[in-house]
Image: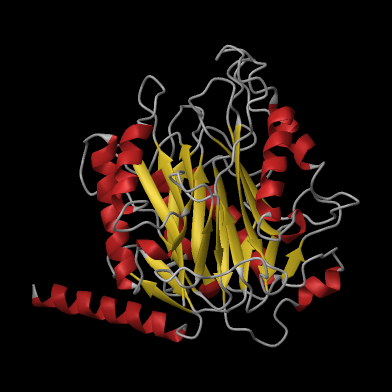
Amino acid sequence: MKLHSALASLAALALVTAGNLHAAAYTAYGDATTVYSTGVKVTGGLPVYFSSGNTAGQGAPDSMKGQALQTMQKLEENIATAGFKLSDVVFVRAYLAPAADGKIDYAGWNEAWSAVFNTAKTPHKPARTTVGVPLLGRAGTYIEIEYVCAKPDEAGLFAGSDKLGLPVSNPMLKPYGTKEGRIYNGVGIKAGSAYYWTAGTTSPMLKPDAPATSPERFGDMKTQATGLLQRLQENLANVGLTFGDVIYLRAFVGPDTLRGGKFDYDGWNAAYSEFFNTASNPHKPARTTVTTPTYGAPGMMLEVELLCAFPGAPDKVTFDNKASPGLKAYGAPTAAISSGVASKAGNNFYFSAGAGPKVGGGDMKTQALSALDTLKTRLAEAGLSFKDVTFLRAYVVPEADGSVDRTGWGDAYTTYFNNKDQPHKPARTTIAVHSLPRPDWKIEIDVIAAAP
């Protein structure tokens, strides 16, 4: 017993020591019992890099572990082009898809993770969220991964971007990739930027009076994507931003249930290409496109969220929130979430790992309250609270009949947000997923918080 306690103490000391090595860049939270950090707080004003979602590509191994290892090797090369190493990775999001038997190999993903992070060579542990989705681009792709990196503003950081000569309309952005590609491999943000998150946005109804099961109610994918992107343009214009300021675009594509049930990637990309990588806006953000099994409303097929950087001081934003002095939330007072949240330059950023419920079983509200309680504790460890949350993403598992208890989730959410005691509302996306790492979980939640 004494030997076990001594080893545990040494392991905990090793974790603290590893965190201190990067004290100038970030602080990792958690303990030695986990394979990833429960959260990472990035020192305010540092350069940050967001990679696009990466897969192993064609000719990949036919296993989750093999594809995950190959994908992380690609990502290591990806971030190296911008001057970052694995020890600079602060957050990882992984989307896992089922094999031919319909099962998702979470164990294979964890084996690959433990070969790359939390090792003798790389003792660092980023925060991490893992969710299961129905499909990743094409059958046989089992995993897609995103990295977020941060480090001190060293001489020469992002110099590689300048050499690429890619079009840039925002001086704070440093893109990586090619002129020919539809999206960039990743986008760096120079030190001292102010940020803006939009909530997950869906398309307006094309014909609200049409029957609920009519394809004309929302229109086809290209129509929906066009209307949605126009909505996002208006959202950004409200705070003095354009599509040239987008760092990251994340799209959740649902099946076309009224036209055969396929995922219409072509329709989504056709609309996207009318707003990005054009003569009027040559900019291309980093991007991930993944699938969701359902939106609940027949015919609805797409939701998109954006992360942007202000090209200079955000002159249209007044940070006058006394409770959260570094943030500014936008949207209708009657809405449950903000349409967008701006964060002042120099804020510290906190990336939480995905939190699931501590309770086994139970209804959606019970599980969501448990997950939010865990996040509340994790934020407090970093000196933060729910009033500092800029963005919240909830992944929910549909019931056997395909329904999602959004009322239960909403009741849990308003226990912690948008109430008399805590009126702050983050930008938010709630998305249905195929499954979560534990089969008894109905919900997993992660947050980004920011504060001076």
* Residue appearing at x 74%, y 56% in the figure: 242
Image location of residue 157, percent across then percent down: 70, 80
Image location of residue 78, percent across then percent down: 67, 63
Vertical arrangement, residue 152 with respect to residue 429, above or below: below
Image location of residue 365, percent across then percent down: 27, 39
426 to the left or right of 304: left
Vertical arrangement, residue 62 with respect to residue 224, above or below: below
Furthest residue in direction left, as rendered: 1
Look at the image and tell me whether residue 36 can be seen.
Answer: no
The coloring applied to the image is secondary structure
113 to the left or right of 70: left
Quarter placement of the N terminus: bottom left
Look at the image and tell me whether residue 284 can be seen.
Answer: yes
Image location of residue 244, percent across then percent down: 77, 58
Quadrant assignment, res 395: top left
Vertical arrangement, residue 391 with respect to residue 443, above or below: below
410 to the left or right of 169: left
